[in-house]
Image: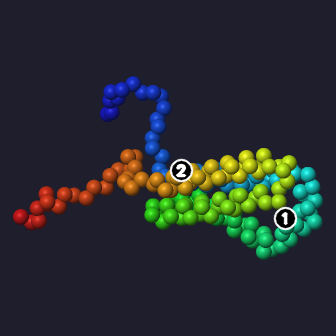
Amino acid sequence: MTIRTTAPNGLDDRPIPVQAKLAAAWTSFMFLVIYIDYFHLYQPGEIDVIRGGDIFVFEISGTLMSVFFALIAIPTLMVLLSMTLPARVNRTTNLVVALLFIPICVFNAAGASWDWAFYYGLTIGVEVLILAFILRSAWTWPRTPSPSVPDLVEPDRSQIQLGR
């Protein structure tokens, strides 16, 4: 039986593992990317341009759609990988992928008119903030186990008696 010696504040604020923070950030990033792409269709004339066979300056083709799929699949897979990769590989993967996605996010403003500058500035800004959170979380990954994880302590070998 546990006896509390302090009055409870009503909320439990347990440490969140870095892997869960990273997976949540990549999930947020993906929702944002999807909605930014969706809201892009509301720009006047954009659907007509797409129906005409172009996206930005690129002709719509299987190759272009495959590139777009790969660009979306990478952060989608990062949700899974952030929860399953070993810590060292996880940290490195998150650092590399987040760094690579910053210029990709900024490229979304290419060709935009000044009428849409606030929209692109706002959306790219939020995307980059999430990527900065991912970079910070991965960079500052704790070197010791979290307090919520039981310590796996090796026995003190000087105290072990070897058959004596």
Q: Position of residue 73 (x, y in %)?
A: 67, 64
Q: Tell me the quarter of the image containing the N terminus.
A: top left
Question: Quick one: SS at disc 1?
Answer: strand
Kindly give the residue lying farthest to the left in the view shown.
Answer: 164
Q: Is residue 72 left or right of residue 57?
A: left
Kindly give the residue lying farthest to the top in the view shown.
Answer: 7
Q: Mark 1, mark 2: which one is toward the viewer?
A: 1
Q: Is residue 158 left or right of residue 44?
A: left
Question: Quick one: SS at disc 2?
Answer: helix
Q: Position of residue 163 (x, y in %)?
A: 9, 66
Q: Nearer the viewer, residue 65 or 102?
A: 102
Q: Nearer the viewer, residue 122 or 156?
A: 122
Q: Tell me the quarter of the image containing the C terminus.
A: bottom left
Q: Which residue is mark 2?
A: 21
Q: Which residue is mark 1?
A: 55
**Residue at (22% x, 58% y) in the render:** 155
**Residue at (67% x, 52% y) in the render:** 127
Q: Nearer the viewer, residue 25 or 14?
A: 25
Is residue 77 something that shows in the picture?
no
Q: Residues within 10 Å of mark 2 (few under 14, many from 20)?
A: some
Cα distance between the residues tagged 1 and 2 = 34 Å
Q: Position of residue 99 (x, y in %)?
A: 60, 61
